[in-house]
Amino acid sequence: MKTLPLLIAAAIGAAALTACASPEEIHAMDQRTCSGYGFHPGTDTYANCMMKQADKRDQDMRANMQNMSHPATQPAAAPAATVIVIPAEGKPKLPDCRMQDPGVTLNMDGKWEGPNCTPAR
C-alpha cells in the first residue's frame, strides 16, 4: 500500500501544476493519474476517471476564482464612542471634535465640527 500515498502526492502535484500547463500536458497528467489507479484506456472506468479529473480541476478553478473575488474581510472597527462631559454647573458639554471622529468636517475657520462634538465657534 505504499503506492497510495505516492499516487495522492502525484495527484496533488498534478493539480498544482495545471495552472501553467498546456491542455495536452493536463490530459497527459490525467492519463497518468487514471492509469496509476489501475484503470486501462478504452474502458468505462478509465473514461469515468478522466471525467472526474476534469470535473475536479474545474471545481478547484471555480473555488479559487470565488476566493479571489471575495477576500476575507476584516471586522469593522467599532465606532468611536461619544463622551459627554457633565461639568459641575450641570450643563452637558460635548467633547471637542477630532479629525478621526465619524462625520467630522473641517469648516471655513479651519476648525473640526461634527454631529457628536462641540460646535466650532
Image (cartoon, rainbow, N blue to C red):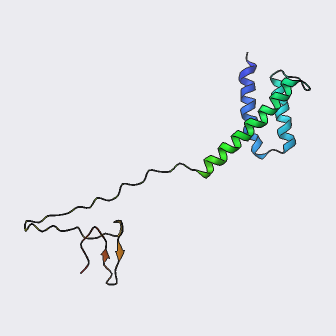
Identified at 61% across, 52% down, the residue is 69
Quadrant assignment, res 52? top right
x, y (%) of residue 13?
A: 73, 35
Foreground: 118 or 12?
Answer: 118
x, y (%) of residue 45?
A: 84, 23
Q: Find the residue positioned furthest to the bottom.
A: 108
> Does 20 appear above or below 42?
below
Identified at 86% across, 35% down, the residue is 28
> Does 10 appear above or below 18?
above
Classify residue 33 as left or right of residue 70. right
> Does 88 appear above or below 119?
above
x, y (%) of residue 63?
A: 65, 43
Classify residue 102 as left or right of residue 51. left
Identified at 21% across, 68% down, the residue is 94
Identified at 85% across, 22% down, the residue is 39
Classify residue 27 as left or right of residue 73. right
x, y (%) of residue 114?
A: 31, 72
Q: Quadrant of the N terminus?
A: top right
Q: Find the residue positioned furthest to the left.
A: 89
Quadrant assignment, res 36? top right
Classify residue 20 as left or right of residue 88. right
Q: Quadrant of the C terminus?
A: bottom left
Quadrant assignment, res 111? bottom left
Label tally: 0
Q: Find the residue positioned furthest to the right.
A: 42
